[in-house]
Every structure is written in structure tokens, then in C-alpha cells.
Amino acid sequence: MTASRFAYDDETFLLDGEPLRILSGALHYFRIHPDQWADRIAMAHLMGLNTIETYIPWNAHSPTRGTFETNGGLNLGRFLDLVGEAGMHAIVRPGPYICAEWDGGGLPAWLLTTPGIRLRSSEPRYLAAVTEYLEAALAVVAPRQVDSGGPVILLQVENEYGAYGSDADYLRSLTDTYRRNGITVPLTTVDQPRDGMLEKGSLPELLSTGSFGSRVDERLAALRAHQPSGPLMCSEFWCGWFDHWGGFHHVTDAAESARNLDRLLEAGASVNIYMLHGGTNFGLTNGANDKGVYQPTVTSYDYDAPLDEAGRPTEKFWKFREAIARHSAVPPLPSDVRVASEFVVPESVPLIGAGLLDDVAPGEWSAFESAPTMDDLGMASGFLRYRAFLSGGDEPTVLDLGEVRDRAWVFLDGIAVGVLSRAAGDHSIALPRGFGRLDVLVEDEGRVNYGRRIGEPKGLIGPITLGALEIAGWEVAPVPIHDLPAIAECSPASPLPLRAGLIRAHFELHEPADLAMVTSDLGWGVAWVNGFALGRFRPRGPQRTLYVPRPATQSGRNTVVLFTQEPPRSRQLSFHPSLDLGPVDD
């Protein structure tokens, strides 16, 4: 692409002085297998869009302070280059807070352990860490701006900040950091156009945009009242919603959503559709909400988007294309345009036990006087084993774990006592006696990504008491989650585990293919295919399949590894011809 100048006047965006309406769709590169980025970008163009928008997840790129990883699925530069090669523009939203139903809203766990730090504020320690991150991220983005021949035309400062705070000095510090690090394109903010959020979440020198999916005229009027001049833009046009475990699968009416999009375009506004294609919370990357009840987000981030979790066009895709075509030229449909055809369904195969967790991955234990949190150990996510030796009496007694974040399996002398769930408000359980070896396996089910509980530590939040006395003398061992696939593949066959353990299965494919792996009878756990982390599965639903991306499979033999904390109800691994995201709330 040749170098251009992107700006805006009192009414519209301008590319080299000519009006440009932004028709954008959100694609999160970190939720899509990197070998499928080009396909999703091509489908965006086919729907009639001219721009791709993405967040940058700070915690994924910087698992430790001072690092900025760009390998594999985190190769932001390659993703932006593919956008440019497709002849499309790009909008980048570096945060540092992104929400996005992503683990911790993108804020890294190591950041949260700094004593006295105030998140999303001008507090010096927070700003120092943010500046380090932005300098690294913007080093990737700045050379790819439109005035350097790249695709990037806009960057966003923070994210829906007006719903959280009103620290103008913080926003100004972020803006200054952007400019000092070579960002020349216009800067925006986004907030819901209501309840004073626009006023609190922006600065006069930044272009305010709105986030909404309905009541278009009312929302645009509120945006214009706040900002008398400048182009109108809905930079999060909500066309769907996300799901949490134990709930329904959310869908929105395609025709109604298309009518709202049509009305938005008729009003002359620019748009970013959130989401064009949601993708998947691969591995342990899902976030959670907690507005009095803890609700972790499911593995699928389908979002009822125009492209489904496998990147196939839905009814919403075609209706959005029709709406866009009434206001802008859309490309002709190729003869081989993809349709939502059924998946390949490999034959069901037996599940093979690969050992109990404590036997095949005994772990490295460390001693503490009181039970530490995961954050105390530098753990960003995963599973932590706790162990203590009780010296009480032989009468039944109550174990109180303080607060469980987020699920705990309790054992006494190797015998299961019960399960405690944060989502259910559990924190105490009756033990049959007060002596013996106490083992507790704790899972972090996803860090809160929205609201005042962002930044809370994970694990057991003490004090931990047995009856009236606090338990002292603990050993802890993190579960080596990333090593489990290799451990499972080389472990001898064994019975299917009745408690935390590993399971493997092998299936055959004639050629690589997208798959829908049935998980409704697999118990509670995490799955991998050929070492690629698919994500969590739960018997409670709503999600009943896991999406297996084609590039994660191979011709011939494929290996599935499961780390289960509760036993499967089936002895077979099976596949389905379509994704099953669960029942819909009518």
C-alpha cells in the first residue's frame, strides 16, 4: 500500500482528503488460529467491510514484565500485514485494559501483585508498567500506520473508561505515550452514550465514539450532543453477546440487528461491528463477570456473530451484507463462496486413561506457613495443589477455606470429600474427622474482566480454619498445565481416572479438517488436540462441543489429551457434524 494521510473534519473521516466511511468488523487475532487469519479477513471483505479492528491483549503478550512476545498466534505485525495485503484498513485498540470477556480484561497478573497499585489510573507505578507495554506494542503498530504505507488508520485510547473512572490525567498520559512513540493517526475513545460515560471517558482532543447495538437514533443524538463536531461512529456495534457456564447460549435476531445496522449507516455514521467473528477462548484465556455472582465465560466466543466460531457465514452475515450494499459497494460473490456445511465426523474412539495427576505429574512442592494465593507464586492462571497435615480429633468438623477462587476439590487421606464452587458461594465443607492429610486442588476459572473486582488474586483466600483454629503449615505445587499433553502421551495406559487425571484418545483423518468435538459427557476439564490447547469443557453447558480448528489437525493419526478433574460419563470420544453451543433463551 502507498503512503496516505488519514484525518477527519467536522463531519467525516478523510483519506487523502476524500471522504471515507469506516465499515469495520472486529477480529481478535488472539482468538483465531494464525493459519486462519487470512481467511477471516477475506470473509470480512466479502461482507462489504473495508476495515478490520482488533484489541491487543497485554497479558498474552507480556506474561512477565519486560517481555513482549510476538510468536505464533501473537504475531500482531503479521496479522496487520495480512489486513493490508487484503486491501483493507485497520483499527488497533491497545487498551491497556480491553475487557473483551478476556482473562482479567487483558491486565497481566504480575501487575496486580504490586502493593498499593491503582489500576486504570495515573498512579505512578501503574503508569510506569503501562508505558513499558505501550512502547513495545506501538513499536509494532507505528510502522504500519497509513502514512507509512500500512493499514492502520485509528488507535483507541483505553476502553470504555467512562464506565470505570474519570481520571483525565490518566487518559492524557496514555495519549502522550501514543504520540511520543510515533502514533500520528487520529486517536479515539469509546463509551456507551449514556449516564455521563462519554464525559468521563474521553478528552476534548480525542474523538469520542459510541458502543451500542440498538436505539440507534437516540444513541447517535447523545453522541452528537456530547461532541458537536467530528464524524459519528459506533465503534462497538453489538450484534450478539457472550455466554457463561450454566447459562443459555445468547442469540440476537438477525433481521432486527441488520435493521439497526442499516439505520446507523443511513444516518451517515461509521461502524465497527462487534464481533464480525468472535473466535474461541483457547486454553485458559476466558474472562469472567462478577456482579454479585461469579460467572466465568465459556470457551466459545461465537458471539452470534456474522461469521460463526468456525468462520462460516451465518444468516446475519448475509443480512448485514444486504444492509451494507444499500449504502456502499460490496464485492461480487465468488463461485466457491463458503457455506455453513457440516463438519467431517471421525469415528468415535475409546478414551484411554493416562494416569492420576499426582502419579504422573507429582509436581514441585514448596512450604509456606499460611496458604499462599496463585498470585503469591507468580501464577497467572491454571491449577494449584494445596496440602496440609491435620492434627485434630476424630470427630466430624468443618473446614472453612475463606474464599474459593474459583473451584476446589477437597480430599482427606486421598478420599474425595466434596467440591466447593465460587459460583455457588461455597467456602466450607464438613470433614469426617479432624486429622489426616488434607489435599485441595484449586482451579482459576478465569479472572474478572469487568467492574470493581478486576485485579483480585486467585487460589484460596484465607484464613483457612478447621473448626475454630487456623491451619498452619502448608505445601503447594502448581499443576504443570503446559506439560500435560506430553506427559499424557508417554504415560502407560491405565483405568480412566476417577479424580484429577489425564486421558488420551487417538482418531484418524484423511486430511486436516475443522471438527466439533463432543464434550457433554467428558466431565470437567481442559482439552488439547495434537498439543494445541482447545480450552475448557463443563458438563453443565451450555456449550456441548469444542471447536477444533483445521490447522490444529493433521492427516492420519491425531491425539486428544484431556485433563479432567471430574470423571467422564462416557468411555468414548466422539464428534458432531456441527457446533453445539447449547440451548437458546427464547
Image (spheres, rainbow, N blue to C red):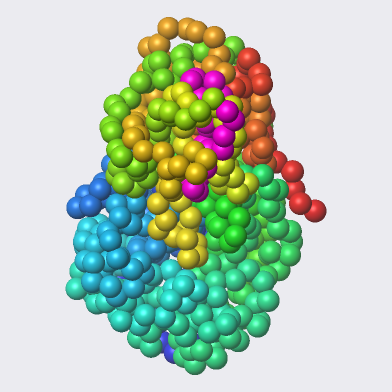
Q: Residue at x 43, y 21 (%)?
A: 357
Q: How many marks?
A: 0
**Residue 434 appears in the picture as rendered:** yes
Identify the image quadrant of residue 490: top left
In this rendering, is residue 187 above or below 78? below
Residue 246 location, x and y as percent?
66, 44
State left or right for residue 114 relative to residue 257: left
Residue 397 shown in magenta = yes
Residue depicted at x 50% and y 74%: 163
Query: Going 50% across and 48% down the picture, which residue do you hit?
Result: 403
- Comparing 352 with 270, the one in front is 352
* First to last magenta residue range: 395-417
Up/down of 463 relative to 325, above or below: above
Identity of the residue drawn at 47% across and 30% down: 392
Q: Is residue 585 left or right of residue 455?
A: right
- Residue 298 is situated, as x and y percent measured from the top left of the image, at 57, 44
Q: Main secondary structure of the magenta part?
A: strand
Coordinates of residue 37 in the picture (x, y in percent): 43, 45
Q: Quadrant of residue 178?
A: bottom left
Is 463 covered by the magenta stretch?
Answer: no
Q: Quadrant of the N terminus?
A: bottom left
Q: Is residue 52 visible?
A: no
Q: Position of residue 57 (x, y in %)?
A: 37, 54
